[in-house]
């Protein structure tokens, strides 16, 4: 951690199949125990399922729209003022929006009851594309929480 200036961000190389940094970040978050090839296989098969569901539409566009739909615009942060903790609504930085959307989508997919992870991920991405599902509910809950604590917005730092 440098004493002065911003911390440099590590660049994620783009995905080899689609050439997308977003896909590479998603696969890295999907990966467990360093098994990247397993994560890639799950993700690519889920995109093929999306292609079948949409009737031949580009699955990468569906994936990007699904992640865009899950991105939160505002969230609450804890702030201690005079011995009391307040949930202060703050805007979410663009890089954090993407990482939260990815995490929420993957966690929602893992919590689903379908048989394989490919089916779970494909169905969760399809639901997010159509603005329903657990990841969208998480985003709406976050927005609702920030909206209900709007009176504490003057504590923003």
Image (cartoon, helix red, strand yellow):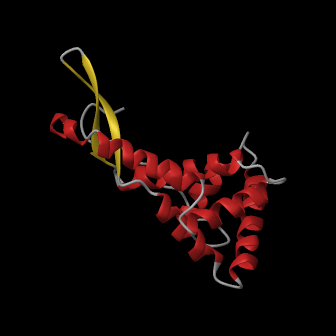
Residue 139 to residue 65: above or below: above
Residue 62 found in image quarter: bottom right
Question: How many numbered dots are placed on residues in this image?
Answer: 0
Q: Residue at x 18, y 34 (%)?
A: 155
Above or below for 121 versus 90: below
Residue 8 coordinates in the image, percent (x, y): 37, 46
Name which quarter of the figure residue 4 lies in: top left
* Left or right side of 89 for 21: right
Q: Nearer the viewer, residue 39 or 34?
A: 39
Q: Is residue 66 above or below residue 57?
A: above
In which quadrant will I find the C terminus? top left
Quadrant (top left, top right, bottom left, bottom right) of the N terminus: top left
Q: Residue furthest right?
A: 115
In screen coordinates, is 6 left or right of 53? Answer: left
| Residue 10 percent across, percent down from the top left | 46, 49
Going 65% across and 75% down the picture, which residue do you hit?
A: 59
- Furthest residue toward top: 83
Q: Where residue 145 sits: x, y (%)?
A: 37, 41
Q: Position of residue 156 (x, y in %)?
A: 20, 37
**In front: 118, or 115?**
115
Answer whether residue 157 is visible to the viewer in this image: no
Nearer the observer, 116 or 18 = 116
User: Taking 22 as reference, is 144 above or below it?
Assistant: above
């Amino acid at each position: 951690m440098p004493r002065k200036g911003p911390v440099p961000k590590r660049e994620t190389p783009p995905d080899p199949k689609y050439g997308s940094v977003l896909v590479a970040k998603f696969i890295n978050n999907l990966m467990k125990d360093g098994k990247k090839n397993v994560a890639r296989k799950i993700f690519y098969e889920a995109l093929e399922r999306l292609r079948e569901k949409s009737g031949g539409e580009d699955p990468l566009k569906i994936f990007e729209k699904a992640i865009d739909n899950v991105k939160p615009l505002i969230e609450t942060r804890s702030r201690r003022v005079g011995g009391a903790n307040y949930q202060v609504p703050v805007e979410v930085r663009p890089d954090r929006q993407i990482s939260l959307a990815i995490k929420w989508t993957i966690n929602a997919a893992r919590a689903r009851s379908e048989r394989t992870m490919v089916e779970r991920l494909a169905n969760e991405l399809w639901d997010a594309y159509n603005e329903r599902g657990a990841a969208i509910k998480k985003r709406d809950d976050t927005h609702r929480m920030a909206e209900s604590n709007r009176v504490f917005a003057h504590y923003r730092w």
